[in-house]
Amino acid sequence: MLTQKILTISAMVAFPINSEGYGVEMQVNADLIKAEREKRAWSQEHLAAAAGVGLRTIQRVESSGIASKETAQALAAVFECQVQHLVMKSQEQPVTPFWRRPYSIVASMAAILLSVLLMATRAHAGEIMLDITLTLSSHDAKVFKLITKEGQQAEASVDNQIKIVLIPTAEGNDRILLTAEIYGFKEGVYSLLSKPKVLTREGVDAKIQLAMADGSEVDINIRPTRVWRTAVDSR
């Protein structure tokens, strides 16, 4: 009996967060801020206290030149100048780092990554499972579970009574064509009785009925299902 393995992939995206929280940031002149501080003979701790921000914020501003609008305003007040004096001339407009842009961009990237991972770990192996119920009379049913590749034969039989040969072929997204050959047993050999073709959908029973020479009827139910395998199965 086939056991399908379902591989669940969860994607988690990390967003950098600093002590100032999320907000619009701007590129400031780190060298100028450092020069203004040193001109006053202040330490980074002193400047942080005077501006009302954390020490790590001052260290970040002087090392990267990126500051929130609130931090830039606080530094301008301490240095008694306009905010524009501290902003880099080539980037006077506030800039938003890519990780703080609308979440729709990051969400789209995560969805694409998830799709790629799913396709890489779960692929159709070109096989079809056939659940067959073969009823020779109202109280005599035989059940078979077969797996075969698309376009290749699968066979089920009840000794000295009937045999069915099936060839499944995928037709579109969820449709499967079943080409059958049904044989009856007579005088020691199987003889071809019928060659029906049935188009059905994946997971839906296809029904074939056949009247035998002795007046009895044969009911055949076939449920085709594509076989999916994970990367683990294919090893």
Image (tube, grey):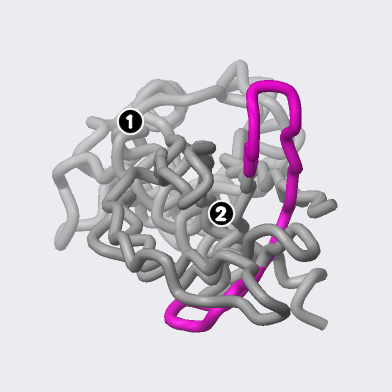
- Towards the viewer: 232 or 74: 232
Image quadrant where residue 234 sits: bottom right
Q: Is residue 191 above or below residue 43?
A: below
In the rendered image, residue 63, in percent from the top left (x then y), is placed at 59, 60
The reply to whether dot 1 and dot 2 touch (C-beta < 8 Å) is: no
> Element at badge 2?
helix
Rendered residue at 34%/43% (across/down): 201
Number of numbered tags placed on the structure image: 2
Q: Nearer the viewer, residue 155 or 96?
A: 155
Q: Which residue is mark 2?
A: 62
31 up-or-down from 49: above or below: below
Q: From where the camera sits, is residue 221 visible? A: no
| Image quadrant assignment for residue 179 | bottom left
Residue found at x 81% / y 50%: 3
In reply to whether residue 143 is colored magenta, the answer given is yes
Q: Which amino acid type corresponds to the residue marked 1 in the rendered image?
A: Val
Q: Quadrant of the C terminus?
A: bottom right
Instruction: Give coordinates of residue 110: x percent, y percent.
Output: 47, 48
Q: In this rendering, would 140 be left or right of 228? A: right
